[in-house]
Amino acid sequence: MFNNFHLDEFVAKFVIKRPVSLFANDMQANREALQAAIEGASMLVIGAAGTIGSNFVKAALPFKPAKLVVVDINENGLTEFVRDCRSESGFLLPSDFKSYPINFSDKVFNKIFANEGPFDIVANFAAHKHVRSEKDIFSIEAMIENNVINAKSLLDLLVQHPPRHFFCVSTDKAANPVNIMGASKKLMEEMIMAYSRDLKITTARFANVAFSNGSLLAGFIERVAKRQPLSCPADVKRFFVSPKESGEICLLSCILGETGDIFFPRLSPEEDLTSFASIIDPFLQQFGCQIILCKTEEEARLATPLIAENKYPVYLFNSETSGEKLFEEFYTEKEKPLWDKYASLGVIKNRERQSRAEIDAVVSEIEQLFARDANKQNVVTLLTSLLPGFKHIETGLNLDQKM
C-alpha cells in the first residue's frame, strides 16, 4: 500500500506547502558560524531517538563534530536512529560515537556524563510532548517530573561542567498555555532563564512537526497500515514544520542564539495555519482511496470492510478535550520579538528572569504538592499561581477517550 508514498514529498506539498526548508537561507547564511562551532566539537544529545532530536543530529552531522554521544530511554528508537544514520548518505557519524538507551534522570547518566565529558554542545529533547498526558494525576506527575524537575537536575549538573552551547526544546504551547503540558514547558522556560546567568542556554518554540513520532499524522500511517479508520478534529488548525526543519531551527537556536534567547519560526496565521482535516483527503489519495465520512467512531469501525473497495472511513469531530486550543501562537503580548536578524526566525530576547533561589522555591513547592495527596485540580491551581498567563481549559474529556 505504501509503494508509491514518499513522506518527505507529501509533507512538502500538502502539509507545510514549501518546496525547500523554511530555514534554508538562514542555514546557508550562517554556515561559517555553524561550522566553526560544531567542527571538532564534542556533542551530547539527550532524547536523540525522537523526531526532533534525531533531526537535530542530522542537521549537525555535515559540520563534522569529533564526538557524539546520544541518549534516549527508547531503546528500539535509538537502535533505528543509528541504523538510519548508518544507512543514509550524507549523515556520517563520527568515529567517536556512542549510544546509550537510558533515562537522563538515571544515576548511570551522571557516570556517563563524567566519563564521556566534558561536552562543547549539549541538547536536551527528552520531554513529554502530548496534551493527553494530563489525563490523570499520575500522568501529570510523570510529565512535570520529566519536563521540569529532571530538567533542573540536568541544569545543576551542567553548571558544574558548562558546555559552550546548551539547548533545551520548548513548544508553541508554552505561549499562553491552556494545558498542563504547555504549562510545564513554560515553567521549563522560566527555569532556563534563571540559569541563563550561569550557562549559555537557548530554546525554541515551534510548530507541530509533521508526522513526528507519536503525532496524529504519524497515526494516519499506522491506521492505513492496519486498515483502520482515520479520525481527527475538524476544527483544529496548527502551524507545521517538516522533521528536517525541526532539526534546523533547534540547531540554529543552539549555536547562534545568545543566552536566554527563545527562537520561533516566522509563520503567518493567515497563510500557514493548516487543519488536520484538510490533510486527510490528499493523504488517502496517495493510496488510491476516497473518503467515506462517518458520524461516529462505531460507524467508522463498522465501515472498515469498505477499505477493500478503496473507500476509506473517516470520522471528523469538533474538539472537546481538555487543554486544546483551536490554534497555537508563538509569543505573548508581553513578549516583543526581534524580526531583523534572521530571514525565517523571530527571537524573543531580554525576558525577565527569576533568580535561581526563586526557581528552587517553585520546584520545592511542586515536589511538596506531589508528596501530599495531589489531584489534577490542585495542580492546576498551583500552576495558575506560578504562571499568571496559564488559563487551563477543562472539559472532563481526554484524548485517550478518542479514536
Image (cartoon, grey):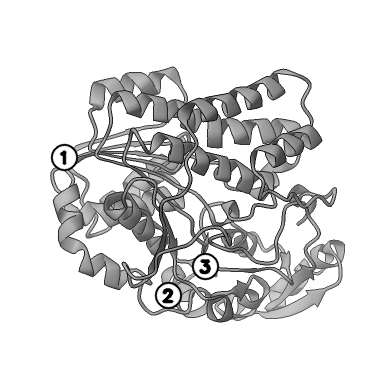
- Residue 226 vertical position relative to residue 140 in the rendered view, above or below: below
Q: Residue at x 28, y 68 (%)?
A: 26
Mark 1 neighbour density, 10 Å: few (under 14) some (14–19) many (20 or more): few
Which mark identifies residue 240? 3
Q: Residue 349 at x, y = what percent?
A: 41, 54
| Kind of residue sitting beneath label 3 | Phe
Task: Look at mark 2 in the image and give the residue it sits on.
Answer: 9
Label 1: state its secondary structure.
loop
Tell me the quarter of the picture where residue 375 sits: top right
Q: CA distance from mark 2 to mark 3?
A: 15 Å
Work out whether residue 5 can be spotted: no
| Nearest to viewer (mark 3 / mark 1) | 3
Whichever of callouts 2 and 1 sits on the residue coming sooner in the sequence is 2
Task: Look at mark 1 in the image and give the residue it sits on.
Answer: 95
Q: CA distance from mark 2 to mark 1?
A: 32 Å
- Residue 278 vertical position relative to residue 301 in the rendered view, above or below: below
Q: Residue 202 at x, y = what percent?
A: 38, 47
Work out whether residue 266 can be spotted: yes
Q: Quadrant of the image for the N terminus?
A: bottom right
